[in-house]
Amino acid sequence: MATENDHRTIWALPAPAVRKPRHTREQIAEAALRIADQEGFEAVTMKRIAAELGAGTMTMYYYVRNKTDVVALMHDAMLADALVPDDELRGSWRTAMSAIARRSRQVLMAHPWSVASLTEAQFGPNAMRHFEQSLAAVAGTGLPTAARFELIAAVDDYVSGNAMHAVEALTRAKAAEADPAMVEAAVSYGIAQLQSGDFPQLSAIYAQSTASGEPAGPAMTEDALTSQFERGLEAILDGLAARMNIG
């Protein structure tokens, strides 16, 4: 059994030595992800994972040392899902980076709690594979190593930021649908604020929207947010191509 004083990553530790362990690290990660998806990240505890797997709480410590190990396994399981088929990396750098960006966003959106909750997760083998795929995508650009890293980071930052805002928008839309009175109260407050004269830009947009009968912004639906993501991704890639002088 590993101890708290052993600071190696979970993947550097040997798997349980029994011939046929009752549980695997993959099963622990899957159980933890199910709990987080259904009940929120804070619900992921050793006790709750053990219950999900039909095991005793202390049994979990035979496989992992603490929640840090569990979080690392969860993160790596998600990144396994984020990997794209190799044939999607064989086109242009833009095609390959677009495929990686789309798949990464899909995984983040499937686990909406993850953007804010896995910031301290240890990098594992699938994190390395994910980064390897990104490096393979930009290998043909002719850019020096530092510039390739910057290109990848710019796309990654856009993906994570977009996913975070999309999750927030969908959460707000769901809450609004469930509680129309809350929406009415928020709208009334917003209109009162616009009448103060402190928000000329917002007031102009609101007046134009009211006059035309058209919504001022895109619908807060998954399809609309995905379309917005695609337009932004194209703009990001256009800007990177121009700035870095790559085709």
Image (spheres, grey):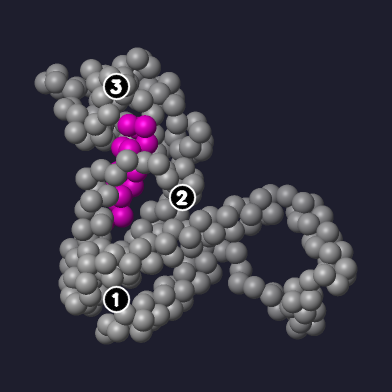
Task: Name the residue carrying label 1.
Answer: 94
Sequence-wise, the earlier of marks 3 and 2 is: 3
CA–CA distance in space, label 3 to label 1: 45 Å
Q: Amino acid at mark 2?
A: Val
Q: Quarter of the image for the C terminus: give it.
A: bottom left
Residue 190: say if magenta: no
Q: Amino acid at mark 1?
A: Arg
| Residue 247: assigned label | none
**Picture disc at residue 5:** 3
> Percent from the top left, x then y, of residue 140?
18, 75
The quadrant of the picture occupied by the N terminus is top left
Ranked by sequence position, the earlier of labels 1 and 2 is: 1
Please give the count of numbered marks on the rendered protein. Answer: 3
Identified at 46% across, 76% down, the residue is 231
Disc 2: which residue: 115
| Mark 1 nearby-residue class (10 Å; few <14, some 14–19, many ≥20) | some
Q: Residue at x 32, y 41 (%)?
A: 122
Callout 1: helix, strand or loop?
helix
Q: Is residue 101 above or below residue 178?
A: below
In the image, taking residue 8 as reference, residue 229 lies left or right, namely right
Pointer 1 with pointer 2, Cβ within 8 A: no
**Mark 3 secondary-structure assignment:** loop
The residue drawn where x is 31% and y is 55% is 82
> Is residue 46 depicted above or below 130 in this figure?
above
Horizontal and vertical percent position of residue 40: 51, 38
Q: What SS does tag 2 mark?
A: helix
